[in-house]
Amino acid sequence: MHEEMTREQYILATQQNSLPRTEHPPFYPVGIYGWRKRCLYFFVLLLLVTMIVNLAMTIWILKVMNFTVDGMGNLRVTKKGIRLEGISEFLLPLYVKEIHSRKDSPLVLQSDRNVTVNARNHMGQLTGQLTVGADAVEAQCKRFEVRASDSGRVLFSADEDEIVIGADRLKVTGTEGAVFGHSVETPHIRAEPSQDLKLESPTRSLVMEAPRGVQVNAAAGDLKATCRKELHLQSTEGEIFLDADTIRLGNLPVGSFSSSSSFSSSSSPSSSASRQTIYELCACPNGKLYLSPAGAGSTCQSSSNICLWS
């Protein structure tokens, strides 16, 4: 009996020794605990609040700026371009190809100082400029033109060489008229209907010259030439022709003679008008004309004392 117990103990002992022994590894907890977990929750909550604020601000901006599928506020994006309604303010330069208003409203460009429109070539060089300021309107370009809206005819053009006015009539309404510093070339000068035409030089002389002649014609009125001193009618190669039904020479001096052959002269025929009504027209060698009382023969020789005093 004792031997059987010993054998069983040996077998049990050897079986226990042959079974593998399992060792449990150390236990480590998985996850975030403590202050790290609280910080993570705080950052997640802060991110959520930020997203909500950004979403609210975006919705507010869209509402205030009036964003739609067509544009923003008064700005509409169409197939032909951009349409802007109402009053707009540009703080920086505006580069566009074409600006036009609606058919039922004008286009107004307004600035506190001036409005400047520039035109440049493909190299960026300034080729034309229009400036509307408080004191003046300035245009800087090679050629400035004003055309009619219906026919496109040039009404006014100006460049470095000349200024052309293509209108049917140029009207100057100023009280002082038009002042020209140099010569004026025109084929015709005329006044308005029922108005007088006056050519005047207040302090100097007035000269009218033409190589083929100067013609002055008064079809329904008088032609009067008045001067303070001498009036000269001179023809170097031709003649002076007076053609009229009546030719009068007024205020000619009158020469008279007496029976004693003593001669005297008077400045007007008023003293002898009661006795003498017919006179003879006489001429001095220097061309001076005077009157002599008519007689049976010529009395110019007897009254030639006027020529001595001329």
Image (cartoon, helix red, strand yellow):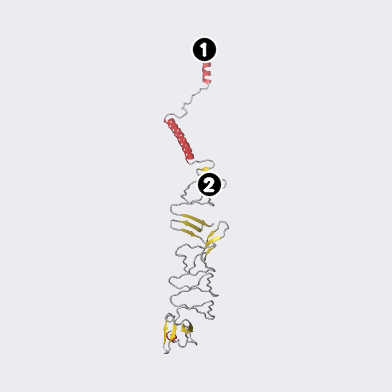
Q: In the image, which disc is placed on residue 5?
A: 1
Q: Which residue is mark 2?
A: 83
From this view, report whether residue 166 is shown above or below residue 62.
Answer: below
Tell me the CA gap for discs 1 and 2: 112 Å
Image position of 44 (left or right of 211)? left
Q: Residue furthest top?
A: 1
- What residue is drawn where x is 47% and y is 57%? 131
Q: In the image, which disc is placed on residue 273?
A: none
x and y percent of residue 278 in the render? Answer: 48, 82
Q: Residue furthest front?
A: 275
Tell which of 75 and 249 is nearer to you.
Answer: 249
Tell which of 235 and 275 is nearer to you.
Answer: 275
Amino acid type for the residue under numbered disc 1: Met
x and y percent of residue 239 in the render? Answer: 53, 80
Tell which of 66 and 227 is nearer to you.
Answer: 227
x and y percent of residue 247 in the render? Answer: 51, 77
**SS of the residue at dot 1?**
helix
x and y percent of residue 304 in the render? Answer: 45, 87
- Which quadrant is the C terminus positioned in? bottom left
Q: Residues within 10 Å of mark 1 (few under 14, many from 20)?
A: few
Residue 309, by quadrant, is bottom left
N-term-proximal mark, 1 vs 2: 1
**SS of the residue at dot 2?**
strand
Amino acid type for the residue under numbered disc 2: Arg
- What residue is drawn where x is 49% and y is 55%? 117
From this view, report whether residue 17 is shown above or below residue 106.
Answer: above
Residue 228, by quadrant, is bottom left
- What residue is drawn where x is 52% and y is 16%? 12
Q: Residues within 10 Å of mark 2 (few under 14, many from 20)?
A: some
